[in-house]
Amino acid sequence: MKLNGTSSNTPSDNGLKANGVHLNGHYNAQAVDELLADEIGEAHGASSIDTPMRPDAFDLDDDLKIDLIEEHFREIMSVLGLDLTDDSLKGSPRRVAKMYVKEIFRGLNPANKPQSTLFDNKFRYNEMLVEKDITVQSYCEHHFVPIIGKAHVAYISSGKVIGLSKLNRIVEYFSKRPQVQERLTVQIADELKRVLETEDVAVIIDAKHLCVSTRGVHDVNSSTITASYGGKFQEEATRQELQRYLAQPGVTI
Ligand SMILES: [Zn+2]
């Protein structure tokens, strides 16, 4: 953090003064920006429920995006001083570019959203359905490192049911983006409500953030739990029923 510049920029006092950015009666704009960015990253707050995307996000096709990211990632490696003529490294820029576009950030593209077919609830099953321990592999949008954990989703049918694997697919789709866990939780819940035509949807995510465990505070033990309870799940009895199911030991076969 640079603290030797001068700026007459004086943002309102939002607590940054206590962190030593207040210099000679002036705030240092760059230092303030940097500190604010760090704090946003560590706080893991989302600025909006929708993933912030530009309107022209899909003007470029996947192949062109891969070419451009390859070029830029090569530049990043080069700036770090890595020798890109080395056999082990020379393919990395293209590998990373393909991985970004085709795998770990494929959920940015609405074209990859799973199509959810609904079925009539012929069994007249009107109780809660819980799909627990769904694998979550997402990526922190502040540090671009993995968020790994489990999602539990539950709904009470409004007359329609959805294929079980679609629940996994919806979790996976929204996970494959730069994310914050709170937004991921709400995006999954909103999509399930839309598809299932009911507010009676709950989503709980318990995940480890590699930006917390492998850098920063280096806490390898903590995990983060977020939850969205809609409709009947806001009632204490329904919520407790869900908690009871989640507390049961998993089935092993
Ligand atoms: Zn992070």
Image (spheres, helix red, strand yellow):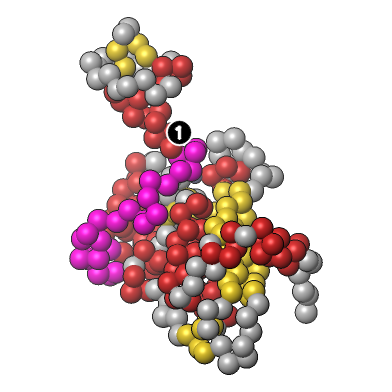
Number of callouts: 1
The spot of residue 13 in percent (x, y) is: 36, 20
**Element at label 1:** helix
**Magenta region includes residue 251:** no
Image: 31 above or below 153? above
For the point 22% across and 59% down, the residue is 55
The spot of residue 136 in percent (x, y) is: 56, 63
For the C terminus, give its image quadrant: bottom right
Image: 173 above or below 122? above
Can residue 138 be seen here? The reply is no
For the point 66% across and 44% down, the residue is 222
Q: In which quarter of the image is residue 115?
A: bottom left
Q: Give the range drawn in magenta.
A: 41-65
Q: Which of 167 and 145 is in front in this view?
A: 167
For the point 20% across and 60% down, the residue is 56
Residue at disc 1, CB closer than 8 Å to ligand 1? no
For the point 61% across and 43% down, the residue is 213
The spot of residue 62 in percent (x, y) is: 29, 69
Q: Assess disc 1: are there few (<14), some (14-19) or many (≥20) residues with their C-alpha within 10 Å of its C-alpha.
A: few
Image: 165 above or below 241? below
Q: Name the residue under label 1.
A: 39
For the N terminus, give its image quadrant: top left
**Magenta region includes residue 49:** yes
The spot of residue 193 in percent (x, y) is: 47, 70
Q: Main secondary structure of the magenta part?
A: loop
Q: Which residue lies furthest to the bottom in this view?
A: 122
Label 1 is placed on what type of residue? Glu
